């Protein structure tokens, strides 16, 4: 039975003493109850800043508990910076599949509960965010047009870390802007669009 006055981690040793004779008391096996008033911590693992080639992605998280162990996680989502709502409740999983709507940015927060019922103290601030992009919309203006094609061409051949690399133009997040990215954007232009 937890006692609030005792600090977390304090061990309570419940013993029964059996007097076999006057000089040598014997003791039964101890039952040890550890006071756990320490909430666990958990966090959403980093996500790519954007997904353009598919609206589906995997959200993963992990947690730890200094005293005791984690019983489950509740994962909250926020759409475009709005209020957090539960996406997955009291789950023992550490990952989930998520499908977003193109044009939306999703933020996630994990709150862990331990086996003693302590709930993680969490600020309503996203631990990881991801933009689900309209396919081909490199600059995020809601349109797929020649401006997006030009942005890919301007960064063509550039790799992560090189001058001129533009992560927005790297539509498949593979670290290089090349023909794959250009083809993807071109394929998503409105039919009949010709870019020079
Ligand atoms: Ca704990
Ligand atoms: Ca655009
Ligand atoms: Ca690429």
Image (cartoon, rainbow, N blue to C red):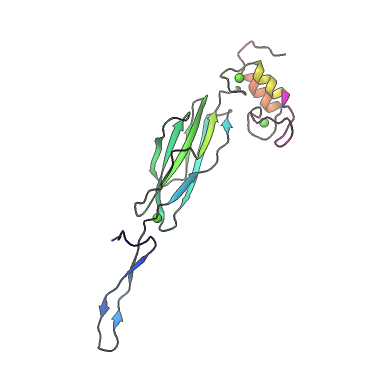
Q: Nearer the viewer, residue 174 or 35?
A: 35
Query: Where is residue 58 drawn, in percent x and y?
Result: 51, 38
Query: Residue reaching furthest top?
Result: 192
Which residue range is magenta in the image?
A: 154-167
Query: Where is residue 6 drawn, in percent x and y?
Result: 34, 62
Q: Check the picture and name the quadrant holding the N terminus.
A: bottom left
Q: How many marks overall?
A: 0
Q: Is residue 165 magenta?
A: yes
Q: Nearer the viewer, residue 53 or 86?
A: 86
Is 176 situated left or right of 93 in this image?
right
Query: Residue reaching furthest front?
Result: 5
Is 12 situated left or right of 144 in this image?
left
Q: Check the picture and name the quadrant holding the C terminus.
A: top right
The residue lying at 72 percent from left, 23 percent from top is 153
Q: Main secondary structure of the magenta part?
A: loop
Q: Is residue 171 magenta?
A: no
Res. 37 image quadrant: bottom left
In the displayed structure, 86 sits above or below 41; it is: above
Quadrant in which ligand 2 is drawn: top right
Q: Nearer the viewer, residue 77 or 193?
A: 77
The residue lying at 51 percent from left, 29 percent from top is 105
The residue lying at 70 percent from left, 29 percent from top is 177
Q: Nearer the viewer, residue 102 or 78?
A: 78
Query: Where is residue 47 drawn, in percent x and y?
Result: 55, 38
In the displayed structure, 172 sits above or below 41; it is: above
Res. 143 image quadrant: top right
Is 142 situated left or right of 170 in this image?
left
The residue lying at 44 percent from left, 45 percent from top is 93
Is 157 situated left or right of 114 in this image?
right
In the displayed structure, 37 sits above or below 126; it is: below
């Amino acid at each position: 039975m937890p006692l609030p006055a005792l600090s977390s981690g304090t061990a309570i040793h419940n013993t029964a003493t059996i007097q076999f004779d006057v000089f040598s008391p014997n003791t039964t096996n101890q039952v040890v109850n550890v006071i756990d008033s320490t909430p666990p911590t958990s966090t959403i693992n980093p996500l790519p800043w954007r997904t353009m080639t598919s609206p589906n992605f995997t959200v993963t998280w992990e947690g730890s508990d200094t005293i005791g162990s984690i019983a489950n996680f509740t994962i909250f989502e926020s759409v475009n910076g709005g209020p957090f709502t539960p996406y997955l409740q009291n789950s023992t999983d550490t990952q989930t599949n998520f499908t977003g709507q193109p044009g939306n940015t999703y933020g996630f927060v994990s709150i862990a509960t331990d086996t003693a019922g302590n709930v993680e103290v969490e600020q309503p601030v996203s631990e990881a965010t991801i933009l689900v992009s309209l396919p081909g919309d490199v600059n995020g203006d809601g349109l797929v047009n020649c401006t997006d094609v030009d942005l890919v061409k301007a960064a063509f051949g550039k790799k992560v870390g090189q001058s001129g690399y533009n992560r927005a133009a790297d539509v498949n997040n593979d670290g290089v802007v090349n023909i794959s990215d250009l083809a993807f954007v071109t394929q998503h232009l409105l039919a009949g669009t010709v870019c020079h």
